[in-house]
Image (spheres, rainbow, N blue to C red):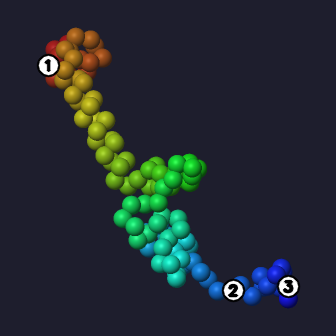
């Protein structure tokens, strides 16, 4: 009886399938637990010793459909606030300020 090549040929049963939360093929069918994200735990699986893994799946690696808009709106609000606080004395700020008569 061998434990090498011939034995590995018989392994054709899938132990993992797709995870509902992370979409990876890491959900163990018998254990009912995802090896990647830890589903069905409430909190996502994350360890500091897996720094590269954290980097791969962190914010900014996807589309960020909503967060891009939030950042843009925040920047425009800051600019408006900045221009309203500083008095309109220079020519550059005068272009944006309504109280400047030049």
* Residue 47 marker: none
What's the distance in space between the residues labelled 1 and 3, CA to CA?
A: 89 Å
* Residue 12 marker: 2
Q: Tag 2, which secondary structure? A: loop
**In the image, residue 44 lies at what x, y percent?**
43, 60
The residue to which callout 1 is attached is: 99
Q: Nearer the viewer, mark 1 or mark 2?
A: 2
Q: Is residue 55 visible?
A: no
Q: Which image quadrant for residue 87?
A: top left
Q: Is residue 59 visible?
A: yes
Position of 43 compared to 22: left or right?
A: left
* Residue occupying the point 39% across, 61% down: 43
Q: Tag 1, which secondary structure? A: loop
Q: Count numbered badges in the picture.
A: 3
**In the image, residue 64 lies at what x, y percent?**
41, 53
Mark 2: give few (<14), some (14-19) or many (20+) Cα within 10 Å: few
Mark 1: give few (<14), some (14-19) or many (20+) Cα within 10 Å: few
The residue to which callout 3 is attached is: 2
Instruction: Give the quadrant of the N terminus.
Output: bottom right
What's the distance in space between the residues labelled 1 and 2, CA to CA?
A: 76 Å
């Amino acid at each position: 009886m061998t434990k090498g090549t011939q034995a590995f040929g018989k392994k054709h049963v899938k132990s993992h399938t797709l995870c509902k939360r992370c979409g990876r093929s890491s959900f163990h069918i018998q254990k009912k637990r995802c090896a990647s994200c830890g589903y069905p735990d409430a909190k996502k699986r994350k360890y500091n010793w897996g720094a590269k893994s954290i980097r791969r799946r962190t914010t900014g690696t996807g589309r960020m459909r909503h967060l891009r808009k939030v950042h843009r709106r925040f920047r425009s609000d800051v600019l408006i606030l900045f221009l309203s606080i500083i008095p309109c004395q220079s020519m550059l700020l005068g272009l944006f300020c309504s109280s400047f008569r030049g």
